[in-house]
Image: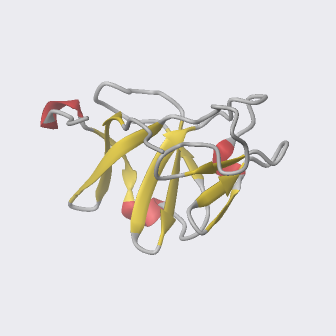
Amino acid sequence: MTTNEDDFGPLCTLDQIRKGEGRHFRPTGGRWRNKAMAVFEENGEYFVTNFICPHSGGPISEGKLVDGVVECPWHGWKFHVDTGLSADKEDGHAVEVYETRIDGDTLMVGGLKRPTK
């Protein structure tokens, strides 16, 4: 999916993101204004997912990120932060993931990425 530049909105500044830890933010503009999102950084790459785990509504941003996989802190469901696909189940569950880009010192969030297996 290609996102129009106008679809991107500011999510947070890069200095607000903790390396290896998730953070909870809400975009201040754009198509996802005020939507709860989880932001992760690993090896210089930034990933944005839905804030809520599809299992029981756990806060994905509080999960542990290891080798591109985040584990929900409530019940241990695991998802790839680059695709949103389940990392430990073949049940079709996934979290939404979003396109990102950097504008100066700001992480911008755009359209939904479509998972591929």
| Residue pictured at 46% horizontal, 75% vertical | 43
Locate residue 41 relative to residue 107 in the image: left or right. Answer: right
- Quadrant into which the N terminus falls: top left
Query: Which of the 4 quarters of the picture holds residue 109?
Result: top left
Q: Position of residue 23 (x, y in %)?
A: 58, 52
| Residue pictured at 43% horizontal, 42% vertical | 116
Q: Position of residue 50 (x, y in %)?
A: 54, 36
Q: Nearer the viewer, residue 116 or 13?
A: 116
Locate residue 74 relative to residue 4 in the image: left or right. Answer: right
Query: Which of the 4 quarters of the picture holds residue 22?
Result: bottom right
Q: How is the image coloured?
A: secondary structure
| Vertical position of residue 62 compared to residue 58: above or below | below
Looking at the image, which residue sits at the far bottom? 43
| Residue pictured at 50% horizontal, 34% vertical | 96
| Vertical position of residue 8 compared to residue 81: above or below | above
Q: Position of residue 13 (x, y in %)?
A: 37, 56
Looking at the image, which residue sits at the far left? 5
| Vertical position of residue 19 compared to residue 83: above or below | below
| Residue pictured at 26% horizontal, 52% vertical | 101
